[in-house]
Image (spheres, helix red, strand yellow):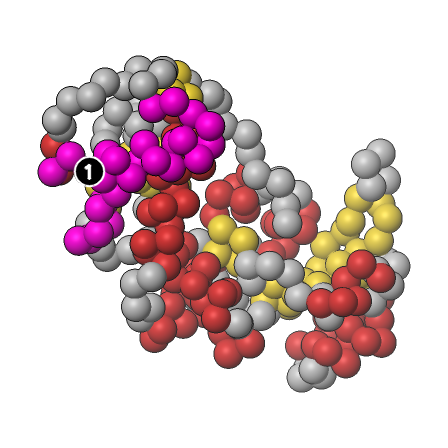
Amino acid sequence: MLPLALAAVAVVSTSCSTFSDSDSVARVGDVSLSQDEFEDTLRGFEVDPSDALDAELVRSQVLTPWIQEQIAAQPIDESAARASYDAGYETSGALCLAVIVVEDEVTADEVAADIDEGRPFEESFAESNIDESQAATGGILECVSQEVIEANAEQPFIEASVILDADDPVGTAPLFGADGAEVGWVVVHFRSFDDLADEDIAIVAAAQGTSADVYVDPRYGTFDSTTSQVVGLG
């Protein structure tokens, strides 16, 4: 998977006091993360809850995973997820792709044209792919979220991918090595909703946010529905 951007680390102090939302550190709908459960989770990271806490650790390792788990447990509106996904990244906030790596631009254009004309992606991959690292998955990549896309927005591969949708599912882009030299080309295929596995659909649904009310104790941040992450205030 493409690398995530690094977040800055902040430090906050905690104290045992009663606060809003029924003493919940976080809540999704009717399910709450109590102060006791929160502190037990911190101890699992060998953190003493009575000490000053690393706010980024709290957000990324405790609150965000817990909230995402609760959201994932909610029923998925598959028709809404399908409509949003088919419209492309700008609408869905997620990308589920498959790729074929070839030697040059001419070959990439030829392979892309074949797929556009109806040739199954699997046939084109078997015939044209030169990247052995993709062989095990047949070129299928993990679905990625808006946060990952934005962190890599200037890469040609991403630029070619974010404009694809169900009606225009094939693109091409150059690939570059660490030294900046061109090392090949990639044919990018926007995977159809019907081809997505259950875990892919869960990512697509999560990228659209949740209709459930999400609360986070403001001492630790707030929930950003566009990225499904708990982020710092300000």
In the rendered image, residue 183, in percent from the top left (x then y), is placed at 86, 48
Q: Is residue 33 magenta?
A: yes
As displayed, is residue 35 above or below residue 205? above
| Residue bearing mark 1 | 24
Task: State the residue in front, 184 or 139.
Answer: 139
Specify the quadrant of the image occupied by residue 105: bottom right
In the rendered image, residue 184, in percent from the top left (x then y), is placed at 84, 53
Give the residue drawn at x 72%, y 54%. 173
Q: How many numbered circles are shown? A: 1
Specify the quadrant of the image occupied by residue 102: bottom right
Rendered-image quadrant of the C terminus = top left
Give the residue drawn at x 32%, y 55%. 71
Which amino acid is tagged 1? Ser
Q: Is residue 227 visible?
A: no
Specify the quadrant of the image occupied by residue 180: top right
Task: State the residue in front, 34 or 205.
Answer: 34
In the rendered image, residue 107, in percent from the top left (x then y), is placed at 84, 66
Left or right, residue 105 beside residue 44: right
As displayed, is residue 191 above or below residue 211? below
Q: Residues within 10 Å of mark 1 (few under 14, many from 20)?
A: many
Give the residue drawn at x 37%, y 50%. 68
Give the residue drawn at x 32%, y 54%. 70
Q: Is residue 40 magenta?
A: yes
Q: Which residues are magenta?
A: 22-49
In the rendered image, residue 37, in percent from the top left (x then y), is placed at 29, 39
Task: State the residue in front, 28 or 104.
Answer: 28
Q: Is residue 209 visible?
A: yes
Task: Determine the secondary structure under disc 1.
Answer: strand
